[in-house]
Image (spheres, helix red, strand yellow):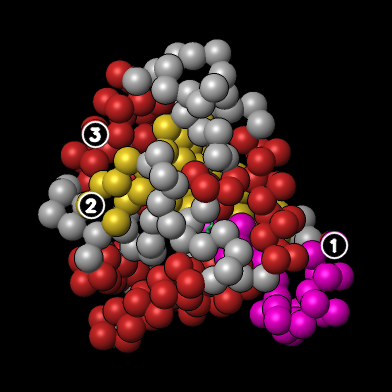
Amino acid sequence: MCDRKSIVTIDGPSGGGKSTVSRALAARLGFTYLDTGAMYRAVAYTCQQQGVDPLNPVQLEPLLASIRIELLPPAAGEDDVRVIVNGRDVGSSLRTPEMGMLASKVSAQPLVRNILTVLQQQIGAAGQIVAEGRDTGTVVFPEAAWKFFLDASPEVRTRRRAAQLRSKGEAVDEQQLLAQIVQRDKDDRERTIAPLKAAPDAILIDSTVCPVDVVIGQMYDRVMTTPCSCKK
Ligand code: DC
């Protein structure tokens, strides 16, 4: 490994397999996994709980000034990172499609992005991190040594997300889920601040027909065989 910060970024639209891939790649490399989407979901959840309109800066500012977000490794037998908000484990409340939509809305607010971006950069300051999200390669860690953009067709992403939700015992309407995924991606791509897009130096991977294990292998090989691709 090189002597610069070892940071891997994995960006892409929802349901493209980013979480599974990022978690597995981090474990294989011995790096920390940083789920930036969980932080936007945590802010969205807190807005909902406190009856705060995320589009109203007068209401949003005090919430952001007092919020404490901690990410902990998943509990035994669980996949998702544990998210502690203001001292309370908010767990699976964050992982619903509705909370994804609200997180997307919240994430378009500059006040929110400024705070979370700094927090993410602090977590990544020591390096040895695999960060996943929408802007980790473009805005949060533009200096990252390895950047990937993971995409798949909306239909395949919907099927994967539906399987994930069903495995947690939730009922899923696939047509509705597809519509939500398409809308959320459009909103994330079209917002003015830190939109969802591939960094110019990211490697694009389409996982539509590519099994997750193969994607992880491709990324791992890339990291191991190009250890000095750091930006000067
Ligand atoms: O990855 P996710 O589905 O948990 O993300 C939820 C929302 O949070 C996503 O629709 C947009 C926002 N987000 C963002 O704007 N920037 C990130 N780096 C990560 C997530």
Question: Looking at the image, is 160 positioned above or below residue 53?
Answer: above
Query: Is 168 displayed left or right of 71 in the figure?
Result: left
The label nearer to you, 3 versus 1, is 3
Q: CA distance from mark 3 to mark 2?
A: 12 Å
Q: For the residue marked with disc 1, what is the amino acid? A: Ala
Q: In the rendered structure, find residue 206 and report the number of the disc placed on it.
A: 2
Magenta stretch bounds: 37-65
The residue singled out by tag 1 in the image is: 65
Q: In the rendered structure, find residue 218 and report the number of the disc placed on it.
A: 3
- Name the residue nearer the viewer: 3 or 83: 3
Q: For the residue marked with disc 3, what is the amino acid? A: Gln
Any part of residue 219 in sight = yes
Instruction: Tell me the element at label 3.
Output: helix
Which of pointers 3 and 1 lies earlier in the amino acid sequence? 1
Query: Is 57 displayed left or right of 221 in the figure?
Result: right
Question: Looking at the image, is 163 positioned above or below residue 26?
Answer: below
Q: CA distance from mark 3 to mark 1?
A: 41 Å
Q: Is residue 53 magenta?
A: yes
Instruction: Tell me the element at label 1.
Output: helix
